[in-house]
Every structure is written in C-alpha cells, then in structure tokens.
Image: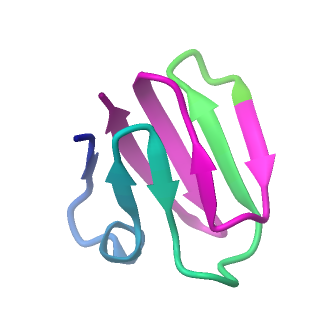
Amino acid sequence: MGGATAVGNALADRLLVRGGEVLLPAGVGEVQVYGMDGRCVLRTAESRFALSQGVYIIKVGDEALKITVR
C-alpha cells in the first residue's frame, strides 16, 4: 500500500493511494503528476489513474502533495 504525506493539506484528505492506483473525488479538475526529477509524467482530468512504483508530486489547482506508490 502506498501513502500520502502532507501537513494541513486538504488534498491529502481527498486522495487515496492503493497499490499502483490513485483515487481522487470526481470533478477535481486537471491533475498533474511529477516525478522526483521535476518532469511532468501525467496530466489528466480523470479521478482514477495508475502509477508505477515510485515517489511523485500530485498537483491539483494550487495544492500539491507528495505520494509514494509501493
């Protein structure tokens, strides 16, 4: 199981990482996913998407959150 890390971040309350799957509530808008090298690896409006094992930054609007996919 993966995890999300944030202090006082509303995005952390709405995001679930389960295995390689990331789940967000429907209608959150554009989601940007960055690798640890700062490169954008995914840009989507989907509320459910898969990521391979690693550490990522998920950005939705003005909020950003570091997640670990295991």
Q: Which picture quadrant has residue 12? A: bottom left
Residue at the spot x=57%, y=15% of the render? 37
The image shows residue 68 at horizontal and vertical percentages of 33, 34
Q: Which picture quadrant has residue 7? A: bottom left
Residue at the spot x=54%, y=80% of the render? 25
Q: Is residue 15 magenta?
A: no
Residue occupying the far top of the picture = 37
- Count of all numbered marks drawn on residues in the image: 0
- Camera-nearest residue between 32 and 19: 19
Direction from residue 34 to residue 53 in the image, left or right: left
Compared with 47, 17 (above or below) is above
Quadrant showing the C terminus: top left
What secondary structure is the stretch in magenta mostly built from? strand
| Magenta region, residue range | 41-70
Quadrant showing the N terminus: top left
Residue at the spot x=74%, y=75% of the render? 29
Direction from residue 69 to residue 33 in the image, left or right: right
- Camera-nearest residue between 46 and 63: 46
- Camera-nearest residue between 48 and 34: 48
Residue at the spot x=70%, y=84% of the render? 27
